[in-house]
Image (tube, rainbow, N blue to C red):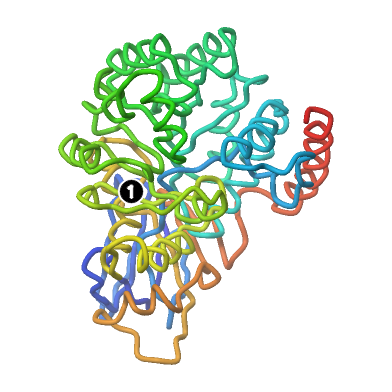
């Protein structure tokens, strides 16, 4: 199958060069594009032809840290006990929600997330999943839902000692079963819920499958305090002791409450940080400061939503006060996820992942001021078409491969089922 985007302007996502052209996309070109000059008269035949006059085409987006399992949280009732701090938020909200998930709820959460990603031009998702009472087969359920919509993915299951020995056994079984068949990471919750025994298991699995871990790090200061109290060292030191900093596939989520020495260790190791600004604001846990680790920082949503353009703007505006960010710094973090995927040889995020922007600005729009438009005017509402791995998955703002309305009818029904379970559990 092939797609021809006629009469468009292609914006290079790295140089911001504006190129008047036709864009030929084929899923048989191993992810490559053909940029044909706008004066070209003999255009190649294509299965799908889209007139993109006065439209802009650029690289689609990817999410560096997501939680699809939280999709049905939108609008849910408040917990019976108002959280006093972040640890209470985990206990009374997220650990109450994830333990109530079953296979049906996992699937609909993944479907709703995949649809939201597609509509927002996010064609690759790095997801961190938790469902302590429905572990077996959970990653395949998510993968199938994402595949159905057309979203590429890098998944992991969140292992944690908070779910008891049975949870650890089942979690690592699920992790290894999935790792043995598909690209994946080893999911870990956070230092304060992980014993040395569990980290040792994760380290052995990491070496066996030549992958990395995906873990929350110092999201709240309590995580650091717990590590110092129990192990007489800080979290990054603890991770280094188990060899987790040796893999460039490793992702450290958040990293708010780390020291300058820890920043140096991270910078020297080549591991990656996933910044989640809006989630940090929502949880009132602090503000991310890149320091010396800016090169390998990418952006995530932490399950707050599936809109990477929105995440980039939040990172920029908050960074004006608590970080050293500029237009270019923030945009680089947004696009760093592509480098993470490419440098670690993960599949699903090649050049044939594109968005078509229906953007009609009231001021001049060009290579020199692209970033100004991106930060202050361009939004996901301007995304008209989305191409993922050479296939059209959003056509004229409508998801192609599934019925949004059918999915949302079911998700609205199942959200009530989840909330009722949570009320009984709390």
The quarter holding residue 253 reads: top left
Residue 324 placement (x, y as % from top left): 27, 63
Residue 8 placement (x, y as % from top left): 37, 76
Between 401 and 136, the residue placed more toward the observer is: 136
Name the residue that disc number 1 marks.
337
Residue 58 placement (x, y as % from top left): 36, 66
- Answer left or right for 263 relative to 365: left
**Furthest residue to the left?**
268
> What residue sits 60% from the left and 29% below the top?
141
The quarter holding residue 73 reads: top right
Q: Secondary structure at mark 1?
A: helix
> What residue sits 45% from the left and 19% below the top?
194
Q: Is residue 311 above or below residue 135?
A: below
> What residue sits 30% from the left and 13% below the top?
208
Q: Which quadrant does the C terminus fall into?
A: top right
Between 424 and 337, the residue placed more toward the observer is: 424
């Amino acid at each position: 199958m092939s797609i021809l985007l006629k009469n468009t302007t292609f914006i290079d996502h790295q140089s911001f060069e504006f190129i008047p052209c036709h864009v030929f996309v084929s899923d048989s070109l191993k992810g490559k594009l053909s940029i044909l000059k706008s004066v070209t008269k003999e255009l190649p035949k294509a299965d799908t032809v889209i007139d993109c006059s006065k439209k802009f085409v650029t690289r689609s987006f990817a999410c560096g840290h997501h939680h699809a399992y939280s999709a049905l949280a939108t609008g849910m009732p408040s917990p019976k006990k108002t959280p006093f701090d972040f640890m209470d938020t985990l206990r009374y909200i997220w650990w109450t929600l994830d333990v109530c998930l079953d296979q049906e709820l996992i699937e609909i959460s993944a479907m709703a997330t995949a649809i939201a990603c597609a509509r927002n031009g996010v064609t690759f998702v790095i997801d961190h999943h938790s469902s302590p009472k429905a572990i077996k087969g959970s990653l395949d359920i998510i993968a199938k839902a994402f595949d159905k919509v057309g979203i590429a993915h890098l998944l992991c299951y969140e292992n944690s000692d908070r779910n008891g020995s049975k949870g650890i056994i089942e979690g690592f079984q699920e992790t290894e079963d999935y790792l043995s068949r598909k690209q994946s990471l080893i999911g870990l919750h956070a230092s304060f819920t992980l014993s040395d025994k569990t980290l040792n298991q994760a380290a052995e699995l990491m070496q066996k499958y030549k992958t990395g871990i995906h873990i929350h790090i110092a999201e709240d200061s309590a995580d650091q305090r717990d590590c110092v109290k129990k192990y007489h060292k800080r979290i990054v030191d603890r991770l280094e002791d188990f060899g987790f900093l040796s893999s460039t596939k490793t992702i450290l989520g958040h990293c708010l409450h780390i020291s300058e020495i820890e920043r140096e260790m991270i910078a020297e190791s080549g591991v990656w940080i996933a910044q989640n600004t809006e989630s940090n604001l929502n949880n009132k846990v602090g503000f991310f400061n890149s320091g010396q680790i800016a090169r390998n920082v990418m952006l995530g949503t932490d399950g707050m939503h599936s809109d990477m353009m929105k995440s980039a703007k939040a990172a920029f505006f908050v960074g004006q006060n608590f970080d050293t960010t500029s237009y270019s710094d923030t945009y680089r973090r947004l696009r760093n996820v592509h480098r993470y995927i490419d440098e670690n040889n993960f599949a699903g995020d090649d050049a044939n992942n594109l968005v078509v922007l229906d953007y009609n600005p009231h001021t001049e729009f060009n290579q020199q001021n692209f970033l100004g438009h991106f930060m202050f005017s361009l939004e996901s509402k301007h995304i008209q078409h989305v191409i993922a791995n050479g296939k059209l998955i959003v056509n004229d703002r409508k998801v192609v491969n599934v019925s949004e309305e059918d999915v949302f009818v079911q998700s609205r029904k199942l959200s009530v089922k989840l909330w009722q379970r949570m009320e009984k559990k709390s």
